[in-house]
Image (cartoon, rainbow, N blue to C red):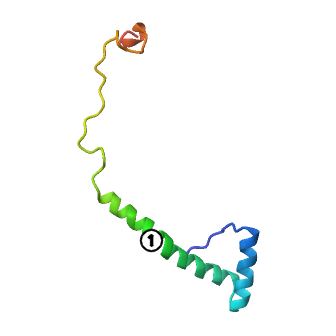
Amino acid sequence: MISTNIHLSEEAQQILIKAAAFKHISVEDLASEILNEVIKDKLIELVQDTEIKAKCKPTLAGTEPFAFYGTPEESGLPADEWDMEKE
């Protein structure tokens, strides 16, 4: 079990308090119940999608890296900056 602090809007807090009173359970128990349900329903898809995507071949796998075969005359760099070995 994980204990954590969460931030709820004032409206959400009021709804949670009223719903817990209606169900005759504590606010903490109701919040835990709701979070467990939502996590299972909403986030399981995200986790499963991530696991499936991790097994797929990367999009750029097998491609060649970019290489620039230009000359100093074709470059956007000034001629004195073209040769990195000067310094």
Image location of residue 40, percent across then percent down: 48, 76
- In the picture, measured across the screen, residue 30 lies left or right of residue 87, that is right
- In the picture, measured across the screen, residue 49 lies left or right of residue 24, that is left
For badge 1, the amino acid type reads: Ile
Image location of residue 7, percent across then percent down: 69, 66
Residue 10's place in the image compared with 61, above or below, is below
- In the picture, measured across the screen, residue 41 lies left or right of residue 31, that is left
Within the image, what quadrant is residue 61 found in? top left
- The residue sitting at 72% across, 67% down in the picture is 9
- The residue sitting at 23% across, 42% down in the picture is 62
How many numbered tags mark residues here?
1
Residue 76's place in the image compared with 38, above or below, is above
- The residue sitting at 44% across, 65% down in the picture is 46
- The residue sitting at 56% across, 73% down in the picture is 2
Tell me the residue that label 1 is attached to.
44
Q: Is mark 1 on a helix, strand or loop?
A: helix
In the rendered image, the residue lying farthest to the front is 74
Within the image, what quadrant is residue 48 found in? bottom left
Mark 1: few/some/many CA within 10 Å (<14, 14-19, 20+): few
Quadrant where the C terminus is found in the figure: top left
Image location of residue 26, percent across then percent down: 69, 86
Quadrant where the N terminus is found in the figure: bottom right
In the rendered image, the residue lying farthest to the bottom is 24
Image location of residue 13, percent across then percent down: 73, 74
